Image: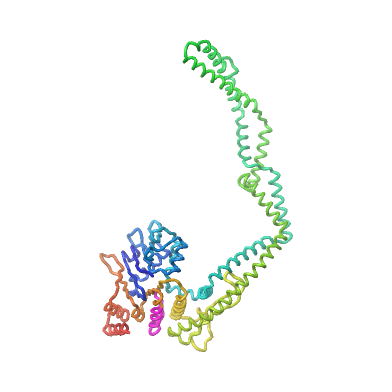
């Protein structure tokens, strides 16, 4: 259950702490006092979308933390799938902060988590139902989801969807292989041309880089050759060359090496230089002799680079990509040439999986039919209690072509008056009737739901009188197994609650603040009287409030 809520800097809320109790809790207050802000704050900490517009004017961030306690075993097991464990006392603290600079920080028991994980965990902890949720009843495509949840078809649907997805994948492969003879011939001709063009080019990885280096060397050949000749001549060929002068110096030093150790050391070094210089001269001579650039060389390189350029325009950014493209063409050609065999094999696999898919679809249909009968009766029972005694509620299941949800279309039909045939909800249901139908569904689903906290945000729209009182009693009934929190404008519902909080706003120094107050018996009388008569509370309204509470 939701035990504590702390809110900072959200809209009209500056700093607010709320302690929630078990049972049935109502939140009341004037329009605009901040009831919706409280719901927005809970949604934020549960991982729903949170806009920077929520941040209080003049503040840099908004922060919400929620403490959940008495978690049930199912929720604890699900949390372990995310590597999250409650504290030793079985509690869980969720925190979320959004900032003006766009930062979004989420933590569970101090551990950072993504908004996506927070949202999944939030679904385990709280189920929030607002006025807009009633509209989902008007979307026929949502009805099958309601029914499947009631039928507990999740495992069956998962098995079905895996096979259905595989079936669609095989179908796509078959369609990709199926082409008419003319199209096939054109494709084969094109692939063969591309393969031959790439193979005949005989490309090698890195060839273009090597050719460009050679091209650059040829363009600079005269400069390179002149530098080599001059260096070689200075070192070896001309009179007074470096090698000749070093050899003379070496011979002279050899005559006096016996006179000094330092001279011996100098002789050894110059002797080493002499032999190293000989090696250098040989290297330069060999490289000079190897240079034999001809006009045909540059023509050959330019021709080769032109071939590579034309292939790059068609098949890839470099030789490696072109070669890889050629391999893919060969694979596709092989696949087309053997497509008939491949299609036969895929068709056989398709038929086998189709049989399994249809078997699972039949099981889904049967499960939905059985669950639909039970759901009809349960909803009629609840609606009869909620002042719709003559109602007929029908779960209509129609067979259709295979979809990702089976072979069924599901639609909820209703007849609110005797003698009228059941019709789609969108045709006849009023706002008050939709509220009661949704409450009926929520109350029935609470029997199979593991969520321990239910929040109803003005679910009483469009109802009054005894119907409102019965909605309150139904929520009171739900609170025997789940914590129920309800935002309401109706005195009949407010009076039935175990706990009553009032939300109000106050202006201090031209700043507006939302506050929350836990009401005792006397203050509850005043608040219910205000709901009945408005700001000018009359004695008759006070008497009515006391009477409602005394019941």
Question: Between residues 177 and 118, which one lies in front from this camera angle?
Answer: 118
Residue 39 locus on image (x, y percent) = 38, 69
Q: Please name the colour scheme applied to the rendered image.
A: rainbow
Residue 78 locus on image (x, y percent) = 46, 65
Q: Does any portion of residue 53 appear in the rendered image?
A: no
Q: Is residue 495 left or right of residue 381?
A: left
In which quarter of the view is residue 279 placed? top right
Callout count:
0
Q: Is residue 467 left or right of residue 205?
A: left
Q: Is residue 34 left or right of residue 433?
A: left
Residue 231 locus on image (x, y percent) = 57, 22
Question: Between residues 544 and 313, which one lies in front from this camera angle?
Answer: 544
Q: In the image, is residue 188 above or below residue 71?
A: above
Q: Is residue 63 left or right of residue 345?
A: left
Residue 468 is inside the magenta segment: yes
Q: Which residues are magenta?
A: 457-477
Residue at 67%, 39% in the rendered image: 303
In which quarter of the view is residue 55 placed? bottom left
Residue at 68%, 60% in the rendered image: 177
Residue 495 is inside the magenta segment: no
């Amino acid at each position: 259950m939701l035990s504590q809520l702390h809110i900072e800097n959200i809209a009209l809320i500056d700093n607010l702490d709320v302690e929630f109790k078990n049972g049935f809790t109502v939140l009341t207050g004037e329009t605009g006092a901040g009831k919706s802000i409280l719901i927005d704050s809970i949604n934020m900490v549960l991982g729903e979308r949170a806009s920077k517009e929520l941040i209080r004017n003049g503040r840099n961030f908004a922060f919400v933390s929620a403490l959940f306690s008495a978690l049930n075993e199912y929720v604890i097991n699900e949390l372990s799938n995310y590597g999250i464990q409650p504290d030793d006392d079985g509690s869980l603290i969720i925190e979320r902060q959004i900032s003006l600079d766009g930062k979004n920080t989420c933590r569970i028991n101090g551990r950072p988590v993504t908004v996506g994980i927070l949202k999944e965990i939030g679904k385990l902890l709280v189920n929030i139902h607002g006025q807009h949720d009633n509209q989902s009843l008007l979307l026929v495509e949502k009805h099958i989801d309601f029914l499947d949840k009631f039928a507990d078809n999740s495992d069956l649907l998962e098995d079905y969807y895996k096979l259905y997805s595989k079936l669609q994948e095989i179908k796509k492969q078959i369609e990709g292989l199926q082409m008419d003879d003319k199209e096939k011939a054109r494709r084969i001709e094109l692939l063969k041309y591309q393969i031959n063009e790439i193979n005949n080019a005989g490309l090698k990885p890195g060839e273009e880089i090597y050719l460009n280096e050679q091209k650059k060397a040829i363009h600079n050949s005269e400069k390179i050759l002149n530098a080599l000749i001059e260096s070689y001549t200075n070192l070896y060929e001309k009179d007074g060359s470096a090698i000749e002068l070093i050899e003379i110096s070496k011979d002279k030093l050899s005559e006096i090496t016996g006179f000094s150790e330092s001279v011996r050391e100098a002789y050894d070094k110059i002797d080493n230089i002499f032999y190293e210089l000989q090696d250098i001269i040989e290297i330069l001579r060999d490289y000079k002799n190897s240079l034999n650039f001809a006009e045909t060389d540059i023509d050959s390189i330019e021709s080769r680079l032109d071939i590579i350029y034309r292939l790059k325009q068609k098949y890839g950014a470099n030789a490696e990509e072109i070669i890889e493209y050629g391999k893919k063409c060969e694979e596709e050609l092989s696949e087309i040439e053997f497509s008939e065999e491949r299609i036969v094999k895929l068709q056989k696999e398709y038929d086998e999986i189709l049989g399994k898919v249809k078997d699972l679809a039949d099981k889904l249909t049967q499960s939905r039919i059985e669950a639909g009968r039970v759901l009809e009766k349960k909803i009629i029972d609840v609606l009869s209690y909620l002042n719709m005694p003559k109602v007929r509620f029908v779960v209509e299941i129609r067979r259709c072509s295979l979809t990702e949800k089976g072979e069924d279309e599901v639609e909820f039909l209703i007849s609110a008056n005797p003698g009228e045939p059941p019709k789609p909800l969108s045709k006849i249901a009023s706002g008050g009737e939709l509220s009661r139908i949704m409450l009926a569904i929520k109350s029935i689903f609470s029997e199979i739901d593991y969520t321990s906290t239910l929040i109803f945000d003005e679910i009483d729209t469009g109802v009054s009188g005894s119907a409102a009182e019965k909605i309150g009693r139904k929520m009171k009934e739900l609170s025997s197994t789940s914590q129920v929190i309800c935002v309401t404008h109706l005195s009949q519902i407010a009076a039935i609650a175990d706990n009553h909080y009032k939300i109000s706003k106050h202006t201090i120094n031209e700043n507006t603040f939302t506050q929350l107050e836990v009401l005792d018996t006397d203050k509850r009388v005043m608040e219910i009287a205000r709901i009945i008569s408005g700001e000018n509370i009359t004695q008759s309204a006070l008497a009515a409030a006391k009477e409602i509470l005394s019941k």
